[in-house]
Amino acid sequence: MISVGVDVSKGKSMVCILKPYGEIVCSPFEVQHSESDLEEMDSLLKKIDGEIRVVMEATGIYHLPILTFLRERGYFVSVINPFVMKKFAKDNSPRGAKTDKLDSIMIANYGIEKWYKLQKFEGDEEIYAELKLLGRRYRSYMELHVKSLLELTHVLDYVMPGIKKLFNSWDEASNKDKLSDFVERFWHFDLITSLSLEEFTEEYLAWAKEKKYHLSRSKAEIVYELASNGIPTLSSGTPSTKMIVQEAISVLRAADSSLHNILARMKELARSLPEYSTVRAMGGVGDVLAPKLIAEIGDVRRLHNPKALIAWAGIDPPPYESGQFVGSRRKITKRGSSTLRKVGYEVMRVLKSHKAPEDDAVYNYILKKEAEGKSKKHAKIAGLNKFLRIYYARVMEVYK
């Protein structure tokens, strides 16, 4: 019984090798995440007699190089939730001392104490791993999209105050951005008011036809009235004004293009999985949300029951009891994937706003919770809890 504790940091790790009862086989030593250093560590481990299990914390992407190397060499590797390890350290180190060497010893001790409960890291299949990576990049670019849209809105407040309320921004499903398209053509109110209402209406309809938007004379009249009553604070005669507007549009479109490409690849990968049609058919899930859900949940077969999936989303309310007191107003833990919670909540929002069929269990459950006096937000969270249970059952049925 040999426990190898690995305290991972960026580009290197501290390694300690222990036997039961705290017997140190090898004092903590540093290993760079390079082929040569890891080969030396592999040679050392092969000289040790006994069953070897390697234990490390999940650290975003920093643990991946050493994890990949050890798994390729056939070692039993267990990746532990940092919260679990933190609790173990708190219970076993009253003084709270912390160094890389002490941490590696603590992780190795965890491996000895939990030897028979350690779960071998199987890892996601390549498709799930790629989907998860793309999902993370999508979230990053979405943050950039929001910042870019805010910047464009700020610029438009100088040249076309109030115009954003009349046009939708980028749509995930269609990959169209009506606001950017319109502002690119009519980048200042002066360009609109320099025309008569009839002239602008004709130009608006020609623009809408070219961009394949709905042809609406009433919309053109509303825009013209806004332009006529608006007060721009940047002159259209200043050469930099048009440049500022066009550059803001360019940055926003670059982010939107990246989002579209990533989402297209996610759809392609998700459709190749056996569970895609099952997930896609669930209430509130469409072509956009299905790949996002699968990317965040991954392979449900790695989870032992539906409660594990709910815990992974961080929407499980932990029990709270003390003596005769039993807590009934409990909050969700939020110790899970924040992205999964956001995607799941979006599914509930779509499900509720589009009025699912009367026989949809999740939709009816949300209505039931609202009828009981729950707020709309809390009712949707309760609905998400039920949705994930159904998700788990249906996807597991696919793989039986």
Image (tube, rainbow, N blue to C red):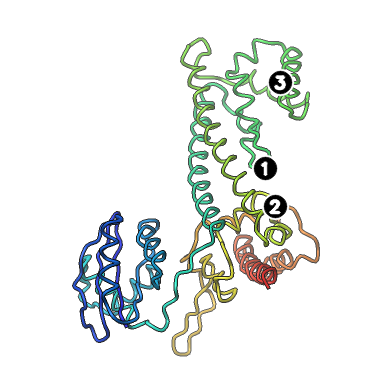
Which mark, residue 88? none
Q: Could you say whether the residue bearing mark 1 is in a helix, strand or loop?
A: loop
Label 1 sits on residue: 173
- Give the class, few, some or many, for how many residues have Cα within 10 Å of label 1's Cα (few <14, many ≥20): few
Q: Residue furthest right?
A: 358
Label 2 sits on residue: 286
Q: Earlier in the sequence, mark 2 or mark 3?
A: 3
Which mark, residue 207? 3
The residue that appears at 23% across and 83% down in the rendered structure is 22
Q: Earlier in the sequence, mark 2 or mark 1?
A: 1
Image height of 324 relative to 9, above or below:
below
Give amino acid for label 3: Trp
Q: Could you say whether the residue bearing mark 2 is in a helix, strand or loop?
A: loop
Give amino acid for label 2: Gly
Report x, y in % for residue 306. 60, 73
Image height of 172 relative to 283, above or below:
above
Q: Could you say whether the residue bearing mark 3 is in a helix, strand or loop?
A: helix
The residue that appears at 76% across and 56% down in the rendered structure is 355
Q: Nearer the viewer, residue 190 or 316?
A: 316
